[in-house]
Image (cartoon, grey):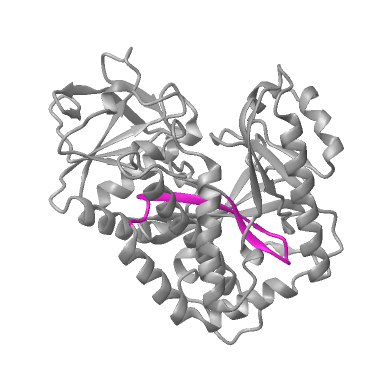
Amino acid sequence: MVPHLITSLNGPINELEQRVLESMPAIERWFRLEWMEHTPPFYCSVDLRNAGFKLAPVDCDLFPGGFNNLTPEMLPLAVQAAMAAIEKICPEAKNLLLIPEAHTRNTFYLASVQRLMAVFTQAGLNVRLGSLDPSLKQPLKLALADGGQLVLEPLLRTRGRLGLKNFDPCTILLNTELAQGVPKALQNLHEQYLLPPLHAGWTLRRKSHHLRSYEEVAKKFAKLLGMDPWLITPMHAHCGEVDMAERSGLDCLRGHVETLLTKIKRKYKEYGINERPFVVVKPDAGSSGMGILTVRDPKDLHTLEAADDAASLTGAMIVQEGVPTYERMNDAVAEPVVYMIDRYVVGGFYRVHAERGIDENLAAPGSSYVPLAFAPSGHLPRRGEKPGASAPNRFYMYGVIGRLAMVAASYELEATDPEAEVYT
């Protein structure tokens, strides 16, 4: 199922689709060469926006939830990708310790954890859940919406290794963003693989680093296809510290908003786009969805002070080019989300929100999810079909842009590795 693209401004996107399809052998070779030089994140999800005149990633999550939204038909791809990932890291792996978010009883999230456990079990691993909650002393049973249950167990730290009672894992998979810091239990582990690495968590990670890495990747890719990188890149600026209580940093923020809006207007004029540009102001760290504001005029920044979640707008901020979504599903605004394990696209879904506009964040209460048929079609585009008319071609294009964000994440993690050179 592909949502209807309700805009006449689909010339550039159709041209992009055609270029991608015509260049498919060169594109796949390009990705293959990139993965020879760089290590992909263990898994990630990428939110995309299709404006008809532009297709770009707007967020990259290195600790993705939502695996429960992938269809059963997608599972073989996910299992094969999990096998490939584990074989590269620890070929003799037998046990996998999965550490989910602490202190959550959200049934949708728990269903995602259940799906992850199923994927890695089918990949040939014994999978058990460990909790970062230090108050947990005995195994805890968590009820699932489907009538099943998960068993969450207290972690055991023995010298330089982390495990559970009678369970010594080769690999530890984090599904928690570490937004509150890095627990001591995860520090200084020896002879165990911790995935993703600790610096992928929001304790250290910054969106501005990822955006800069993506800009570099997109320029390389655009050169390969002979196209304008702006068609697949959200422009951005890093503002630094903003303190709402002290009203500091607002001049810097206002200046970046004004500069970026001017740049977007220039690109819109170049492509004959009769739209009012906007930017998105959001915290440089974290993915809670809080503190995300849409701004069309620098004067609108006074709304920052009146925002209900103004406190979440304190700290380092980024200003990102707003990419509207003109995709609709049952008259509701929709955006595609692509899921990857290792270097492989394993599925995706449309995030749909009936109460949000084309320029708003859809990852909010009230959103729903419609799975994409990536498994039978996403890897088998139909070359020669009219651009914009083929679901497999659309999904393949989404997969290409999602993988570009994944390459960027690999650049980002290499550049921000605390054991490597300092990121500048």
Place of residue 271 in the rendered image (x, y in percent of width and height, measured from the top left): 79, 70
Q: Residue at x 27, y 28 (%)?
A: 187
384, above or below 317, in the image: below
Question: Any magenta on residue 51?
Answer: yes
Q: Which residue is drawn at 47% across and 52% down?
A: 70
Place of residue 268 in the rendered image (x, y in percent of width and height, measured from the top left): 80, 63
172, above or below 186, in the image: below
Q: Which residue is drawn at 57% across and 71% down?
A: 222
Of 295 and 380, nearer the camera is 295
Question: Any magenta on residue 120?
Answer: no
Is the N terminus in the top left, top right, bottom left or bottom right quadrant?
bottom right
- Asked whether the viewer can see residue 356, the reply is no
Place of residue 331 in the rendered image (x, y in percent of width and height, measured from the top left): 77, 54
* Numbered disc total: 0
Q: Is the magenta stretch mostly helix, strand or loop?
A: strand
- Asked whether the viewer can see residue 248, the reply is yes
Lateral position of residue 176 relative to residue 169, left or right: right
Image: magenta residue range: 39-58
Q: Which residue is drawn at 38% across and 38% down?
A: 199
Q: In which quarter of the image is residue 266?
A: bottom right
